[in-house]
């Protein structure tokens, strides 16, 4: 009996499939190049006294960029909606559980234990599994609830698997890893795409979710922008999370302590102007500015490239977000809609919380700018999500998905 040959080249090809979306692809690659250049620039202050630091940062960005690109092309070429029904997808979920729990063994940072730390060649590479939980949340909703028009005797029979899996992801990330920002993103993505499926059993829960969403906006406004909220925060026990709220209310109360980052970020924004100081000419990055190349890289971008640089960055993000939403509106398949919406929300939520945090509009959550902030996991996760979106768009353009 002749054995079937396993064509590995089919799965690791670096070529995008025919009929993929060029605008999304170009915006993605432009974001990667722009982000890499700005990470190196923002890291110059951290490189003082360490001549190899910039080289290490550049190598890390290159390595994770290549890995992310491979993941993107593999997903774009090989992912199908039927893949969600395979055993491989279940193993991905199980692997995510193990990765999230394995983080607890490694040393934490900033009060969170959310990273796997891998020493390699004199450098330490870190992987943040919660980034992939954000993508899995959308895929899990798509698998269990998308295009699901079965009649169930009880709503719980329909919702129990996605609720248990995603709920346990959020619990591990929030309670065990102490990473509020990532758990919030997973929760928001899951809740948002939960509104897409059209099943009679889900409609009452979707109405409740909408009411809770609008109620949360009102409650958030009261807590963040009224004296009532400030009074509530002051009653909380002292700690890292409380300081973030207090710094949001007035970063100058402790401008050399917990408010130091936010104050320096605001100064960077104010000094950028329309055209900025010029590439590489930021002053703040040389003044012991914490997280200049991660959470606060937007402040360095605006200081160096001004409002024009900010608009260019937002334009690249807008291309990815709106092209995904454009196809999500055209496609009838609920599973495909959910995956495209998940990619859009993944980028949009990160932009909202990062920009809001570094400008002092909302408390800082530690959420990075995808593909721009230094961080391999967020880059690989972003490219993977784009690859999944490209797979859906490609199959729609070929007529394989309605």
Image: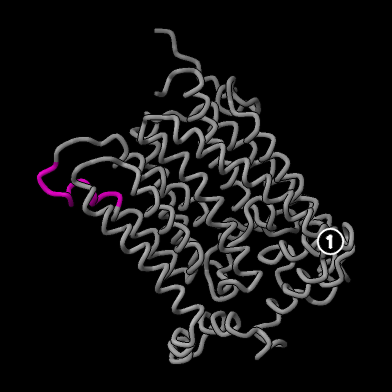
Residue at 29% x, 55% y: name it: 164
- Please tell me in which quadrant of the rendered image residue 8 appears: top right
Principal secondary structure, stretch drawn in magenta: helix
Answer left or right for 83 relative to 299: left
156 falls in the magenta region: yes
For residue 71, what is the image quadrant?
top right
Q: Report x, y in % for residue 277.
A: 88, 63
- 268 to 154, vertically: above or below: below
Q: Where is residue 122 in the image (x, y as percent from the top left)?
A: 75, 58
Please state the horizontal and vertical placement of residue 176, each as a whole percent of the image.
Answer: 42, 70
Q: Is residue 53 something one can see in this rendering?
A: no
Secondary-structure class at tag 1:
helix
Residues packed near mark 1 inside 10 Å, few (<14), some (14 to 19) or many (20 plus): many
Numbered range of the magenta stretch:
152-162
| Quadrant in the rendering for residue 80 | top left
Q: In this orientation, which residue lies closer to the viewer: 283 or 359? A: 359
| Image position of 391 (left or right of 361) | left
- Image quarter of the C terminus: top left
Closer to us: 241 or 92: 241
Residue at (77%, 58%) from the top-left corner?
307
Instruction: Look at the picture and state if 167 lies above or below 261.
Output: above
Residue extending farthest to the top is 1
Return the residue at label 1.
304
Tag count in the figure?
A: 1
Q: Where is residue 397 in the image (x, y as percent from the top left)?
A: 51, 21
């Amino acid at each position: 009996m002749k054995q079937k040959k396993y064509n590995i080249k089919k799965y690791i090809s670096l070529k995008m499939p025919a009929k993929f979306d060029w605008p999304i692809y170009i915006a993605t690659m432009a974001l990667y190049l722009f982000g890499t250049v700005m990470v190196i620039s923002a890291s110059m202050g951290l490189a003082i006294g360490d001549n190899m630091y910039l080289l290490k940062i550049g190598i890390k960005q290159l390595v994770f960029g290549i890995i992310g690109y491979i993941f993107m092309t593999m997903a774009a070429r090989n992912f199908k909606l039927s893949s969600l029904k395979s055993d491989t997808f279940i193993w991905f979920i199980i692997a995510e559980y193990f990765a999230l729990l394995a983080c607890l063994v490694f040393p934490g940072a900033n009060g969170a234990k959310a990273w796997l730390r891998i020493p390699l060649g004199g450098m330490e590479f870190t992987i943040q599994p919660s980034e992939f939980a954000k993508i899995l949340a959308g895929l899990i909703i798509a698998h269990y609830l998308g295009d699901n028009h079965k009649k169930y005797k009880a709503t719980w029979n329909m919702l129990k698997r996605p609720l248990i899996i995603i709920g346990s992801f959020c619990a591990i990330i929030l309670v065990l890893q102490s990473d509020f920002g990532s758990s919030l993103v997973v929760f928001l993505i899951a809740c948002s795409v939960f509104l897409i499926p059209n099943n009679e059993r889900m409609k009452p829960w979707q109405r409740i979710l909408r009411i809770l969403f609008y109620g949360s906006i009102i409650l958030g406004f009261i807590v963040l922008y009224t004296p009532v909220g400030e009074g509530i925060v002051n009653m909380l026990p002292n700690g890292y999370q409380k300081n973030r709220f207090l710094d949001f209310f007035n970063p100058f109360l402790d401008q050399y302590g917990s408010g130091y980052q936010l104050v320096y970020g605001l100064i960077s924004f104010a000094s950028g102007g329309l055209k900025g100081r010029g590439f590489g000419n930021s002053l703040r990055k040389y003044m012991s500015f914490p997280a200049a190349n991660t959470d606060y890289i937007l402040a360095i971008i605006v200081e160096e490239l001004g409002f024009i640089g900010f608009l260019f960055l937002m334009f690249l993000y807008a291309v990815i977000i709106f092209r995904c939403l454009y196809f999500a509106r055209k496609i009838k398949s609920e599973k495909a809609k959910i995956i495209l919406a998940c990619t859009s929300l993944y980028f949009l939520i990160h932009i909202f919380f990062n920009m809001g945090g570094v400008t002092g509009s909302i408390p800082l959550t530690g959420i990075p700018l995808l593909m721009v902030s230094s961080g391999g996991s967020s880059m690989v996760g972003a490219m993977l999500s784009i690859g999944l979106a490209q797979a859906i768009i490609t199959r729609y353009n070929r007529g394989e998905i309605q």
